[in-house]
Amino acid sequence: MLSLVDLSKRFPGACGEPVRAVDGVSLSVAPGELLALYGPSGSGKTTLMMLIAALLRADSGQVIFDGRDISALSARQAARYRLLELGFVRQSPNLIAGADALDNAALKLMAADIGAREARRRIRPLLDRLGLHERALHRPEQLSTGERQRVMIARALSTDPKLVLADEPTGSLDSRRSGEVLSLLSSLCKDRGVAVVLVTHDPQAAAYAGRVHTLRDGRLVDDGDERAAVPGNAA
Amino acid sequence: MRFSSIARLYRVRLRARLVQELFAALGIAIGLALLFSSQVSSTSLNGAVAELTSGIVGQMRFQISARDPHGIPESLMRQVGAIPGVRATAPMLEQGATIIGSGRTRSVDVVGINPQLARLGGKLVRGFGVFRLAKVDALMLPASIARAVGDSSLQSVKLRIGADIDTALVVPDLLVGVSDGLANSPVAIAPLAYVQALSGMSSRVTSIFVQSTPGRDREVLAALERLAAGRLNVRPAAFTETLFDRAAEPTNQSTGLFSAISALVGFLFAFNALLLTVPQRRRLIEDLRLDGYTRRMIVEVLAFDALVLGVVASAAGLALGDLLSIALFDSNPGYLSFAFPIGTERIVTWTSVALCVGGGPLAALVGVLGPLRGAIFAHHAEFFGASALTSARATSWLLGGVSICLVATTAILALAPSAAITGVVTLTLALLLALPVLLDVLTRVFNRLQALGRASSPYLAVMEIRSAANRSRSIAVAATGAIAVFGSVAIETAHRDLQAGLNKVAHGLNATTDLWVLPSGTANALATTPFGGTDAGRIAALADVAKVEIYRGSFLDVGDRRAWVIAPPRDVAHPIPSGQLVVGDMRLATERLHAGGWMVVSAAIAAAQHLRVGQSFLLPSPRSTVLRIAALGTNLGWPPGAIMLNAEDYRRAWGSSDPSALEVALRPGVSDADGARAVRDVLGPRSGLGVQSAAQREQAFRATARQGLARLSEISALVLIAAILAMAATMGAMIWQRRGRIADMKVDGFSRGVLWRALMWEGGLLLGAGCSLGALFGLYGQVLLSRALSTVTGFPVAYSPGFTVALDSFVTVTATAMLIVAIPGGMATRVRPAIALRD
């Protein structure tokens, strides 16, 4: 479903030397698969995510999604791709202050031309499924960080995407809540046949993935099938 | 994207930023209200005179009129009526008068008409039946005016015309059925013969109106010109309207200038209030882009924000502006009523409404979308990675921008002072560009200084200011202070310069003698009413009196300007008030006035007539006389312009030896009060002449000038109120946004006192930088506005750097804002640390 082919991206560095944020990365993700991209800070994980999300254009290589080259999309097509085929879960759940959980979760649906009332109706079962039935009418400041992250997951899945990009989704949660969120994410995606690319530097989070790739200095340093690459999983 | 979704998204987000949005709306609304109300007051002022004029002259085409209050023989009607192509003629005798009722006195324009004008004139005189004119010897007044003087039913009142007081019958039901505004016009209509008898102008009129046969206008006009022979004026029937438009122009221009600048200041307050919400909106854009919203959708979402804000601001601006135009700006420049009958009708045009309705959404669109332009259209990586810190490169760009804007402002000041509004825009831009640089320099210096001490509060304050995350908020706070001080300093100092200039004129024109004897009444404040049968000899014979001299003055129509003619006694030492010459030498001009055959004219009249110093000009006086231009001056506070010559030249040019005032010099040691008492005894109780000391007269002049500048004072006060409201909004928002951070710091062990002091330091630094820069630029704004006022309007402006005003504004705005920080800041530091730990 998703294939990255020899993908590279460079940025101008502070001393004029170009910095290779992503350097010849090739990998593929199948429907329903949870793939973790593991690596320390500055290894190029987020840049890779932005390339997959068509938020950045690669210098070379291709991002093939469902047979289409994502890097060739226009700005409007890229937005449409993110809206309908992609879900994005960020590290810090940045919800709209003043809006309740329902409205926050329905944000993507509102852009999908179905109207606000219908969007709120459609998102309700997903929130229930994520355990937010009682909290649906609560505002961000009345929700815990874990609950806020679950609202973000509901938003990401609201348009039935084929792929979810999760950028350090448990970075601001304790281990118990990280486990809850990741379990929910993986089970929901499995049920719906949604592929997940999980970017993390947390070995425990990476353990939820079916396959783990390690990224260092913009390069994949393994073939993605061995958990041993992740410290902590070696035991 | 569906409208319901956009509206829903707006509504749910509004909850969290309602107060900030309201303050932004208030900022725009105040600006629009000032623009709207000044527009309404201008259109009302000009419109009321236009309606009053057409209410009298109706379908008449031309008028042939006298050049002085002595009028023309009524018998001229026959000659006018005999001109081929003239269909009808109607005479009119117009006299300024004061009605002295049982309650108060009131100035009115007494208009004497005959049945012809009642039949052919406008709605004010039409229906004023032949029967009533023939049968009733009475003044017919609007009921409201009659009530104002305490006479609501048919009765006798005292009527003062010139120096004579007579008894007249008043009928307070004149304008029944006419529009409200016209029905309140200060006009008294009476049969022509009755007004002739009251004014002692038997068989004389001031104008003859002419209706021509269609298609023969040119022929009739030429014949009228021949008949006038350069001694009378031949003009369109409604020419008063043109004269008044010209007279009101400087007042409207100065009000418009101040209003436009106030609107700019109001918009900048709103812009700063919106700048505080930029971080939230940036985060929203970031999220929306990640979630697949297209740029168009994002623009739709933000444009809806702006539209709602703009519509609310427009509605509030219209309501507030309407209120202002009724409550504050309704005060007509009273001094214009000395020469024109000014009605009270309030006229709201579609242009004024459209300006307000369109201005709100436009300002809101600029305010909302402007600062987020980069965020919406930038490439994602640039957007997320952008640093808010001022880099060295950015600093050079900013300083370059400041230089360009200052050069542009200086060029406008030197070469095109009439483009003052553009100058203020470039100056404001320079101020806003200079602010981040100054803020950086100040925080660096402060950082070094506070490093010498051990207090943690200043350290925290500098940390907050220098934090990239707080950058837009810090600049917004400093900019609000800067704009507040800039606006109030520029407007208040320019206003003071204008008032000081008028005060100088008031002193210079009146201090030439000890006592003034002239016809009483506010309508004669400028001593423009000639009177006969003087008691000059008897006054001169008084033991307390050293000398009595003749002063002459009146209004004279020169082109489309009703000029104020000032003719002081020939040997007066300083006939020209100091500082009132625009072109020419004071000593030489004074010598020339003393010598005779010369006059000083306002620069505006000279420009309209294409005159230069030394040139000859045929003065269109009752006896057209050639005089040379001794110098060019200001308008001496009379908007259409003034002409100054000596009293002897006036006598020749007007063909009348009647004085308009007597200048009485008292012997040394005699007080003004004693002298005035002695003169009043000579005049007797039945005289219409009054006695005023030079100081009293100067005070009256100053009061008139103040009244004329009332709108500017009100605008100035409103800007300060808006500034304080804006500061309250900005500082309130700054503290509210800080609560989470304060809770964090409390967790880290900072005490309430330290945090409160840090807030005070931060506020003080931001406001100190902003307000001091605002004061500095405000002083430059003063130069710009004062020059614009003197060159565009021709008013006498006495420029004096407003350091005290700048310091006052700096202290007022900074102290108010610090007070606003101190109280809610203290409350904010009570926030529970648990908030920071809440999960």
Image (spheres, coloured by chain):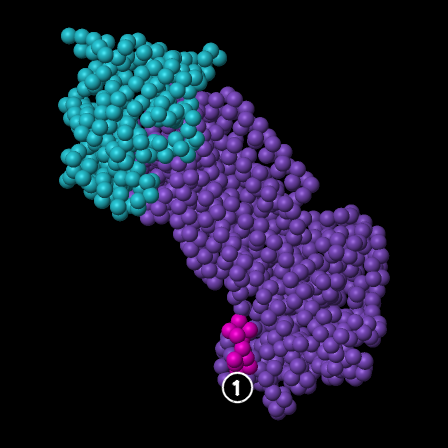
Chain colours: A cyan, B purple
Q: Quadrant of the C terminus of chain A?
A: top left
Seen as rendered, the residue at the extreme front is A67
Q: Quadrant of the N terminus of chain A?
A: top left
Residue B463 point in image, percent of width and height: 37, 24
**Magenta residues: mostly which secondary structure?**
loop
Residue at point 72%, 54% (across, down): B604
Question: The residue marked by circle 1 belongs to what chain?
Answer: B
Which of the two residues, B800 or B269, is positioned nearer the viewer here? B269
Which of the two residues, B223 or A53, is positioned nearer the viewer here? A53
Q: Is residue A56 left or right of residue B409?
A: left
Q: Is residue B352 left or right of residue A235?
A: right
Residue A183 visible in rendering: yes
Q: Secondary structure at mark 1?
A: loop
Residue B195 point in image, percent of width and height: 66, 82
Q: Look at label 1 and name its amino acid.
A: Leu
Q: Which residue is mark 1?
A: B154
Q: Is residue B655 left or right of residue A98?
A: right
Residue at point 60%, 34% (across, down): B406
Over which residues does the magenta segment extend? Answer: B173-183
Image height check: is A176 above or below A148? Answer: above
Residue at point 54%, 36% (across, down): B429
